[in-house]
Image: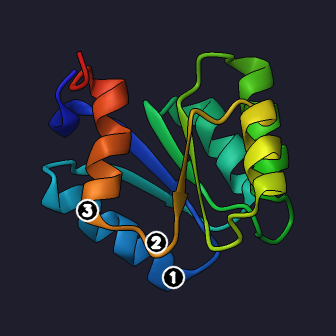
Amino acid sequence: MDISELKVMICDDSLLARKNLRDGLKGLGCNNILEVFDGQEAVDTYMSEKPDVVFLDIVMPVKDGITAAREICGVNPDAYIVMVSSVGTQVHLREAIKAGAKDFLQKPTTPEQIRNALEHISGGDE
């Protein structure tokens, strides 16, 4: 699948972090972008919209990203979740992987990091 065809959901309580990711995605040609504010919104929106890729922050109100990832992967074990956080400790990384995340990006993200994460889902690494 081409990057421009992907439906991507960004979940972060920081407006600036969402804008940074959105701008990076648009710069790569991705225009089908959903944005949500907290982990519960991420789970609900995932269930209704079925995005191809989910960028999830870890520390958020209502429900944290690890819990949201666990719930999403409980429904769809093949969900492609990329954790994006400024709290990139080894403990968080292990928890994210155990919850089902496929990748982990450190904030602030760069267009190159975003492209690399998307190439795995779009088949660009084959």
According to the picture, the residue beneath numbered tag 1 turns out to be 15
Residue 75: name its quadrant.
Answer: top right
- Nearer to the camera, 68 or 110: 110
Mark 3 sits on what residue? Answer: 111
- Report whether 105 appears left or right of 23: right
Question: Closer to the camera: disc 2 or disc 3?
Answer: 3
Of the image marks 2 and 3, the number of the one nearer the N terminus: 2
Residue 73 makes an appearance in the image? yes
Is disc 3 placed on a helix, strand or loop? helix
Q: Quadrant of residue 82?
A: top right
Determine the residue located farthest toward the front in the rendered image. Answer: 90
Give the class, few, some or many, for how many residues have Cα within 10 Å of label 3's Cα (few <14, many ≥20): some
Distance from disc 2 to disc 3, alpha carbons, whole Å, reads 13 Å
Asked if disc 2 and disc 1 are in contact, CB closer than 8 Å, the reply is yes
> Which residue sits at x=58%, y=80%?
14
Residue 30 at what x, y percent from top left?
21, 48
Residue 40 showing in the rendered view: no
Query: What's the amino acid at mark 3?
Result: Pro
Residue 46 image position (x, y, % from top left): 61, 37
From the viewer's perspective, is residue 28 above or below residue 48? Answer: below
Horizontal side, residue 100 vs residue 27: left or right: right
Which residue has dot 2 on it?
A: 18
* SS of the residue under disc 1: helix
**Nearer to me, 34 or 84:** 84
- Position above or below: 104 against 63: above
**9 relative to 109, above or below:** above
**Mark 1 or mark 3, earlier in chain:** 1
